[in-house]
């Protein structure tokens, strides 16, 4: 699953109960999730970030921390079945790790 960024779309998606349930099922199944920028809002609203380490656009770091997640300021972060990135300038690293995750089903350590 790829959760794209963009503040407006991500903000609308995060409150959609069907989207929340869908992403919960994807995560429970251990399937790969790649998220960039504001896309992490759906993970927050679905209650999935507690105990997880990820990055995002810097303006939503408080949301991640307040939901029990650990936010770090790196171009790409891999945590089990998730890979996350901050912003469009991180796309080369994000794409590399997303492809690795989707090919192997496992994130590399970063």
Image (cartoon, helix red, strand yellow):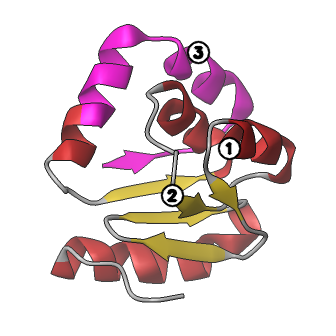
Label 2: few (<14), some (14–19) or many (≥20) C-alpha neighbours in 10 Å: some
* In the image, farthest residue toward the left: 29
Q: Quick check: is 38 in the magenta stretch?
A: no
Quadrant where the C terminus sits is: bottom right
Q: Quadrant of residue 68?
A: top right
Q: Quadrant of residue 25?
A: top left
- The residue at 66%/59% (across/down) is 70
Secondary structure mostly seen in magenta is helix
* Residue carrying label 2: 52
Element under label 1? helix
Q: Is residue 9 above or below residue 6?
A: above
Q: Which mark is residue 24?
A: none
Q: Quadrant of residue 62?
A: top right
Picture coordinates of residue 85, whole percent (x, y): 62, 65
* Residue carrying label 1: 64
- The residue at 61%/71% (across/down) is 91
Picture coordinates of residue 12, whole percent (x, y): 58, 15
Q: Quick check: is 12 in the magenta stretch?
A: yes
Circles 1 and 2, Cβ within 8 Å, touching? The answer is no
Picture coordinates of residue 107, whole percent (x, y): 35, 79
Q: Which mark is residue 12?
A: 3
Magenta region, residue range: 1-24
Which of pointers 1 and 3 lies earlier in the amino acid sequence?
A: 3
Q: What number of labels is visible?
A: 3
Which of pointers 3 and 2 lies earlier in the amino acid sequence?
A: 3
Label 3: few (<14), some (14–19) or many (≥20) C-alpha neighbours in 10 Å: few
Query: CA–CA distance between discs 3 and 2?
Result: 23 Å
- The residue at 84%/52% (across/down) is 58
- The residue at 73%/68% (across/down) is 72
Element under label 3? helix
């Amino acid at each position: 699953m790829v959760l794209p960024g963009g503040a407006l779309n991500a903000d609308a998606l995060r409150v959609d109960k069907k989207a929340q349930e869908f992403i919960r099922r994807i995560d429970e199944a251990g399937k790969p999730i790649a998220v960039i920028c504001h896309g992490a809002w759906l993970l927050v609203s679905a209650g999935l970030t507690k105990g997880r380490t990820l990055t995002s656009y810097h303006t939503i770091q408080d949301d991640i921390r307040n939901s029990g997640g650990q936010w770090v300021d790196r171009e790409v972060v891999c945590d089990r079945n998730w890979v996350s990135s901050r912003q469009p300038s991180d796309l080369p690293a994000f794409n590399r790790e997303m492809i690795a995750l989707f090919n192997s089903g496992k994130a590399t350590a970063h």
